[in-house]
Image: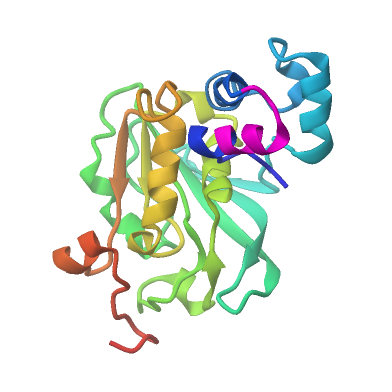
Amino acid sequence: MSIFGSTLDELQQLCADEGLPRYVARQLCDWMYQKRATSFEQMTNLSLAVRARLAAMESIEPNYPIDCQVSRDGTKKYLFEEQVVAPDGTSSTQYVEAVYIPAGNATASPHHGNSLHLASIDHSTPDRATLCVSCQAGCRMNCSFCVTGRGGYHGNLTTRQILNQIFAIPESQQLTNIVYMGMGRTHGQLRQRVTLHTCTYRGVGAGLEPAAHHRLVGRRHPTPASFHRGEPLPCRGEPP
């Protein structure tokens, strides 16, 4: 089990359940999301006893990408292996991608239909660095122009699995933009996105530096009323 991807409130509840001081939750947030610790041994302001206790029941080690393809323009497509839970509750090994787009390049992987909108981000500034993350394994939409949907839908990624794409790549601390336009339909992952913002933004729960200054969410023909109510939207393969 990993506590990486947990909000301050969730960590405070964990500390309460385990009989640990409440302030330990804020220290954990600081070490995981700001100092980017990958083990409890690095958390030197926690007592040895607390570190040993946490290490025995939790993990914060990143799930690093298993492959990386690099294009001539410097764009990098990272491949992650994850255990994904399907709607019927079964778990299976699935592969998801995140695409790193350096300054001067507004073109993303052609495999993701949502990524066609990345040109709306200005990459002309030399220090711009964008990461396009996935929120699902596969996709229900089955759009004719998108390779992702052809393989079917296998389940939602957890907050940890989405956040891991941001923190586990070598360019993590260079990022200025994060776009939720990779594999999957992002408007079906509202709860996960809210949790991601809570984990990575200053002033929202944990007092952390932002992992990126700008964020863009892709949507596939949602109606504003349904989107803001959080209701599922009809799409190919789903009843209206």
Magenta span: 12-21
Residue 15 among magenta residues: yes
Q: Position of residue 141 (x, y in %)?
A: 38, 76
Residue in the image at 66% along x and 45% along y: 65
The picture quadrant where one finds residue 209 is: top left
185 lies left or right of 68: left
Residue 45 among magenta residues: no
> What predominant SS class does the magenta segment belong to?
helix
The picture quadrant where one finds residue 184 is: bottom left
Residue in the image at 70% along x and 17% along y: 43
The picture quadrant where one finds residue 179 is: top left
Q: Can residue 61 be seen in the rendering of this structure?
A: no
Q: How was the colour assigned to the protein in this rendering?
A: rainbow
Q: Position of residue 45 (x, y in %)?
A: 68, 10
From the viewer's perspective, is residue 78 above or below residue 139? above
Q: Can residue 38 be seen in the rendering of this structure?
A: yes
Residue in the image at 47% along x and 34% along y: 199
Q: Position of residue 104 (x, y in %)?
A: 33, 33
For the C terminus, give its image quadrant: bottom left
Q: Position of residue 157 (x, y in %)?
A: 54, 58
Residue in the image at 23% along x and 63% along y: 229
Q: Nearer the viewer, residue 144 or 46?
A: 46
Q: Nearer the viewer, residue 109 or 182?
A: 182
From the viewer's perspective, is residue 32 above or below residue 227? above
205 lies left or right of 14: left
Total residue callouts: 0
